[in-house]
Image (cartoon, rainbow, N blue to C red):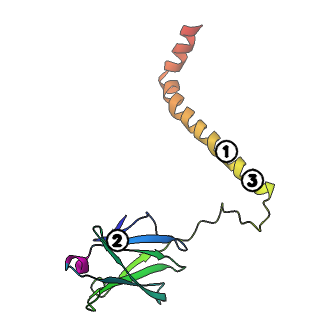
Amino acid sequence: MELSKNIFFNTDKLVENSKVKISYLGKLYQNASEEVSIHYGFGLNWDNVNDIKMEKTDLGFQAEIQLLEGDTFNFCFRNGNDEWDNNDGQNYVFPLEKVQTELVVLDDEPVSLGSARKLRRSYLWSKKVRLAVYKIITYLPKLISGNYKRKLKENQ
């Protein structure tokens, strides 16, 4: 996924507490820098600031980063000559999504049959609603036009 010009991630969404691979083809790569590091942090206050040296490949400079908790993932790039690519002073800032925990079962948590039944019941209701909508869409125009009644008389 391309989040910004010349910055690519190997995933659709940035989710906290997950790993992401970032590829950088920005101005430091285009200026033939031999060495580039990514400087990053999380949230408005740039918590857990870290620098990682990126690996130079044919696809640009790449690094794998463990995303931590926070509202945003903030980063910029620096080469060996201490030149920065910080998005014209604004840094690169992207929102982090929370981990979806509704359907996650933890090992130390007992699983209740009630919650499983509720999930099954809601699944069955969604199937019934879909079937009803399908029937309405399919047969209502026939009933209104009268074609459905004519076919019934022909079959008798």
Residue at image point 59% right, 36% down: 131
Q: Position of residue 133 (x, y in %)?
A: 56, 38
Mark 1 vs mark 2, CA separation in Å: 44 Å
CB contact under 8 Å: marks 1 and 2:
no
Q: Position of residue 66 (x, y in %)?
A: 50, 76
Q: Which residues are magenta?
A: 26-30
Q: Which residue is mark 2?
A: 23
Q: Is residue 29 magenta?
A: yes
Mark toward the start of the polypeptide (1 vs 2): 2
Q: Is residue 78 left or right of residue 149?
A: left
Helix, strand or loop for disc 3: helix
Mark toward the start of the polypeptide (1 vs 3): 3
Q: Is residue 116 magenta?
A: no
- The residue mark sitting in front, 1 or 2, is 2
User: The disc labelled 3 sits on which kind of residue?
Assistant: Ala
Mark toward the start of the polypeptide (2 vs 3): 2
Residue at image point 66% right, 63% down: 104
User: The disc labelled 2 sits on which kind of residue?
Assistant: Ser
Residue 95, above or below 144: below
Which mark, residue 125?
1
Taking depth in this image into account, of 29 and 114 the one nearest to the observer is: 29
Q: Position of residue 58 (x, y in %)?
A: 27, 68
CB contact under 8 Å: marks 1 and 3:
no
Taking depth in this image into account, of 59 and 125 the one nearest to the observer is: 59
Helix, strand or loop for disc 2: strand
Which mark, residue 116?
3
User: The disc labelled 1 sits on which kind of residue?
Assistant: Trp
Helix, strand or loop for disc 1: helix
